[in-house]
């Protein structure tokens, strides 16, 4: 049954109020351009329907979802063909739709048609300058320094990104970062923060430790923290460790907790699920050692410990959800499918039947989640389904809503400006982050960031985004460098994103299906965004 137009529109009124609050909160000349005439025809629209038949459309220019019922669509198309007055609209369409709904749709479209983000160039041939990049990073970059303290690992996980299954990533090795390399990286990072303090004085230093298995080089981790405490003790530095959990014995765990580390453990689920993929070099499962160490930390009452499950097409999602819903497991802070970036051969081992079975299982998981939202909301921690389904659907709805147009230095995709984070490999080379392969260096500990390299990388990446200017979901894009990166070159977005609009259309429908069942699913997020807007920009 189709919901009455006016009810359908007002059901999401708070979402539109939130959008308008964003747009009009800041000085008009800085954020938007208001025009007195309609410009409906220029809008890039992606139409979709929820499972119960309610119609919506995504406007990629402004990042707003609008109700696109038959009345709204008829008024939209009338304005698109010819700029008509309200009286003309009512005269031509009142035999099919109620006058009240026609007036409501006309007035809403009139407001919506005047919203224009500030005009800017979005060209695939854009050539950024070093001064532009440096200036932006001093203001908004350098959010985290990540040290790969070793490439060695005591596991041989079957989906490891550093195995022979991945063409463009490094191989496993027994390399360890030297203390001099680590200290140089830290000193350079803090020098950048000091230089940028006049633009962003509240920026907090963040240091992450990565591997391999970083606890194999635990002594270097302690040296780094001691160095920061001695040299930069006036800065409240946040520390993060990503670990497989097998070496989190009492001594190491106590030290990490004393220094307020956020501990992210790669734990895939119950024993059978975890041991299918995460094993020692001899093939033995690793669950019991990992879970034993995690349990010991939880018993102390320490709360800054999280799980990072990874799934593939053979994963039992419901067994994993039951496991992560238990009281004896940390909350899930991130969940992902095994990497399927360029050069990956991991999924070659699966059949089409495996893929279809996984998609059917995921469909059932989404259905189960949406039918049990009240139960999900009563939990005191995030589970696998909360992240894999709930957070994903919220991101679909809200990620594209913004008062800002994409920055001209990165007009396409969700990729950051290299230098926003700095990843340092064991040899002291700088990279964009831990997820991209090593063919795109952006500097080193001896010479610092190479802004010429960063500009060339940005130029090459942007020039590869050939499909993006015409994409109807460009503002809601979640793609990033690793999705396109090969051996120093980037795949074109026309090759990687061929089905992206189809995929996003389905995702929009799924997200709105949940929101229709339980509007509180999005109301909490709306209220949070309203509060943040009010905090920074006032009433």
Image (tube, rainbow, N blue to C red):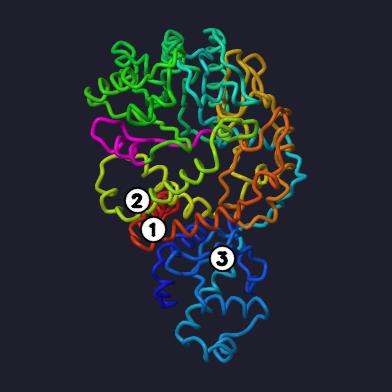
Asked if residue 172 lies in the magenta stretch, the reply is no
Question: For the residues marked 3 and 2, what is the alpha-carbon distance in whole angstroms?
Answer: 25 Å
Magenta-highlighted residues? 318-339
The residue shown at (34%, 51%) is 368
Q: Is residue 194 above or below residue 71?
A: above
- Give the vertical position of 112 relative to 508 (above or below): below
Badge 3: residue crowd in 10 Å (few <14, some 14–19, many ≥20): some
Residue picked out by circle 2: 369
**Position of the N terminus by quadrant:** bottom left
Instruction: Classify residue 304 as left or right of residue 224.
Output: left
Q: Residues within 10 Å of mark 1 (few under 14, many from 20)?
A: many
71 or 163: nearer the viewer: 163
How far from the left and from the top, in percent, is residue 464?
Answer: 73, 42
- The image position of residue 271, as x and y in percent, is 33, 26
Rendering coords of residue 212 (x, y %): 50, 17
Mark 2 element type: helix
Q: Is residue 251 shown above or below 304? A: above
Compare marks 3 and 1 and give the one earlier in the sequence: 3
- Which callout, 3 or 2, points to the residue nearer the camera? 2
Whether residue 339 is visible, yes or no, is: yes
For the residues labelled 2 and 1, say whether their Cβ atoms are less than 8 Å apart: yes
Q: Name the residue that disc number 3 marks.
A: 47
Give SS at disc 1. Answer: helix
Which is nearer the N-term, disc 2 or disc 1? 2
Q: Quadrant of residue 455?
A: top right
């Amino acid at each position: 049954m189709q919901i009455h137009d006016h009810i359908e529109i007002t059901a999401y009124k708070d979402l539109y109020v939130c959008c308008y609050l964003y747009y009009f909160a800041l000085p008009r000349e800085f954020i938007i351009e208001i025009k007195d005439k309609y410009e409906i025809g220029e809008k890039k629209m992606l139409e979709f329907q929820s499972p119960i038949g309610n119609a919506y459309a995504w406007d990629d220019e402004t990042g707003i979802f609008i109700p696109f019922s038959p009345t709204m669509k008829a008024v939209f198309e009338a304005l698109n063909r010819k700029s008509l007055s309200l009286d003309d609209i009512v005269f031509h369409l009142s035999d099919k739709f109620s006058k009240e709904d026609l007036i409501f749709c006309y007035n809403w479209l009139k407001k919506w048609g005047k919203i224009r983000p500030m005009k800017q160039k979005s060209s695939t041939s854009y050539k950024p300058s070093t001064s532009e990049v440096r200036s932006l990073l001093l203001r908004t970059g350098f959010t985290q320094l990540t040290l790969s303290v070793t490439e060695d690992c005591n596991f041989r996980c079957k989906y490891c990104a550093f195995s022979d299954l991945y063409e463009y990533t490094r191989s496993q090795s027994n390399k360890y970062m030297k203390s001099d390399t680590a200290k140089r990286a830290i000193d350079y990072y803090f020098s950048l923060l000091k230089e940028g303090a006049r633009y962003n004085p509240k920026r907090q230093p963040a240091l992450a430790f990565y591997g391999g298995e970083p606890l194999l080089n635990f002594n270097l981790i302690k040296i780094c923290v001691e160095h920061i405490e001695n040299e930069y003790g006036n800065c409240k530095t946040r520390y993060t460790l990503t670990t497989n959990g097998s070496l989190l014995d009492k001594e190491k765990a106590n030290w990490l907790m004393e220094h307020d580390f956020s501990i992210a453990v790669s734990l895939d689920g119950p024993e059978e699920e975890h041991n299918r993929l995460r094993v020692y070099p001899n093939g033995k499962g690793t669950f019991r050692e990992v879970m034993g160490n995690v349990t010991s930390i939880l018993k102390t009452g320490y709360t800054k410990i999280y799980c990072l499950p990874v799934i593939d097409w053979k994963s039992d999602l419901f067994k994993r959800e039951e496991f992560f819903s238990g009281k004896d497991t940390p909350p899930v802070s991130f969940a992902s499918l095994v990497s399927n970036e360029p050069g990956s051969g991991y999924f070659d081992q699966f059949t089409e039947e495996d893929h279809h079975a996984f998609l059917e299982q995921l469909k059932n998981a989404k259905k189960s989640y949406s039918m049990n939202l009240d139960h999900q909301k009563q939990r005191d921690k995030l589970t696998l389904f909360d992240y894999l389904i709930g957070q994903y659907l919220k991101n679909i709805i809200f990620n594209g809503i913004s008062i800002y147009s994409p920055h001209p230095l990165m007009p396409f995709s969700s990729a950051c400006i290299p230098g926003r984070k700095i990843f340092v490999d064991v040899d002291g080379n700088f990279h964009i982050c831990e997820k991209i392969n090593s063919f795109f260096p952006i500097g080193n500990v001896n010479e610092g960031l190479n802004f010429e390299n960063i500009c060339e990388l940005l130029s090459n990446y942007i020039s590869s985004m050939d499909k993006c200017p015409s994409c109807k979901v460009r503002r809601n894009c979640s793609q990033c460098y690793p999705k396109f990166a090969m051996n120093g070159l980037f795949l074109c977005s026309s090759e990687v994103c061929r089905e992206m609009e189809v995929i996003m259309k389905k995702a929009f429908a799924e997200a709105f299906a949940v929101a229709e069942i339980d509007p509180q699913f999005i109301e909490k997020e709306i209220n949070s965004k309203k509060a943040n807007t009010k905090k920074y920009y006032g009433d």
